Image (cartoon, rainbow, N blue to C red):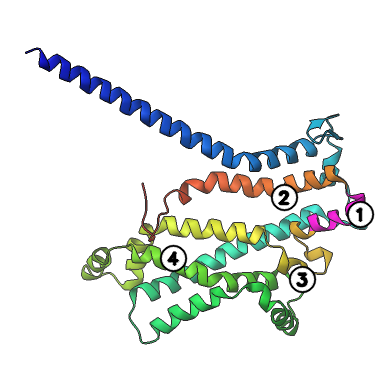
Amino acid sequence: MAKEPLSQAALGRAAKRERRRERLLTWGIYAFLVLASLPLLCGYGWLVLNSFSDKLVYGVIPQRWTLKNFRFLWELPGRYYPDLWRTTWNTLLLACGMTVLMILIATPTAYVIARLKFRARGFLLASTLILHSFPGITLLIALYYVLRSLGLLNSIVGVLLVKTGLMLPLGIWIMKGFFDGVPWDLEMAGLVDGASRLKTLWKIVLPQVKPGIAALAIFSFLNGWSEYIFVITFLQNKESWTLSSYVNSIVGDFQFLDYGLLAATALFYILPVLLFFLFTQKYLMQVSIGGRKGG
């Protein structure tokens, strides 16, 4: 009879040790994540401090708070800088246009590859993988001549078509993984009930791959918003510039660089996409390996 309280006490001590071990492991993970993200947080902190200060003492202490670094928001466009709001509109047009095209093209293409059996299916899969393996910068000269022959140089449409075409293989593979994760039984049940394949796709399959569509939209928007190489190569007219070209024009000669203006412009550039990511990250959290939805 005396052994039972001792065994209960031993179990209690073991449970306490296990909880203590779990707390230590949790705190260790959080400490590692904080240390790993510290350089990034310091970079963003320096950017914010430099944006709202006249000068940083020792590179980190604001000497005087000011808003003059954001003068590009209300000043008229000058000789060297284009219209800010026009470039912002061009950037938004490129990012949103790329998002729409990627969803409209990659989604049905991935569905056909994942669900239909046809003779050239293997070749199509291999070709999309090979096309994605080519760096886009290696096609820069060829794409320049193609856009010039089509009259699409100095046009957002030209950059939009180029970026969409280069990202389509990746988008198709992303969506194919999600379609492969949808059980055949759901689709076959709709077909047996008399629904057409198009209606089955719209009513049954697409709701199951919403996280994939959301992930594809997020990646496409971020890729279009941050595009730089094709923009500075194909868009020489200032009226067609995007924000990446705008920031590049401010850099100029490093000997006479206005770090406050550059930091404020960079903050204006990254703030919309940062907010967009914060509001849409919950959809990315539903993505797991193999295209299946996580909890």
Is 77 in front, or is 235? 235
Up the image or down, 173 lies above or below 4; here it is: below
> For the residues marked 4 and 1, what is the alpha-carbon distance in whole angstroms?
45 Å
Element at label 3: helix
Residue 97 location in percent, x, y?
Answer: 61, 64
Magenta stretch, residue numbers: 246-257
Crowd around label 3: few <14 · some 14–19 · many ≥20 (10 Å): some
Q: Amino acid at mark 1?
A: Gly
Q: Nearer the viewer, mark 1 or mark 3?
A: 3
Residue shown at 35% from the left, 67% from the top: 201
Residue identified by numbered label 1? 78
Circle 4 crowding by C-alpha within 10 Å: few under 14, some 14–19, many from 20: many
Amino acid on which the number 3 mark rests in the picture: Thr
Q: Provide the secondary structure element on which disc 2 rests.
A: helix
Q: Earlier in the sequence, mark 4 or mark 2?
A: 4
What's the amino acid at mark 4? Answer: Met
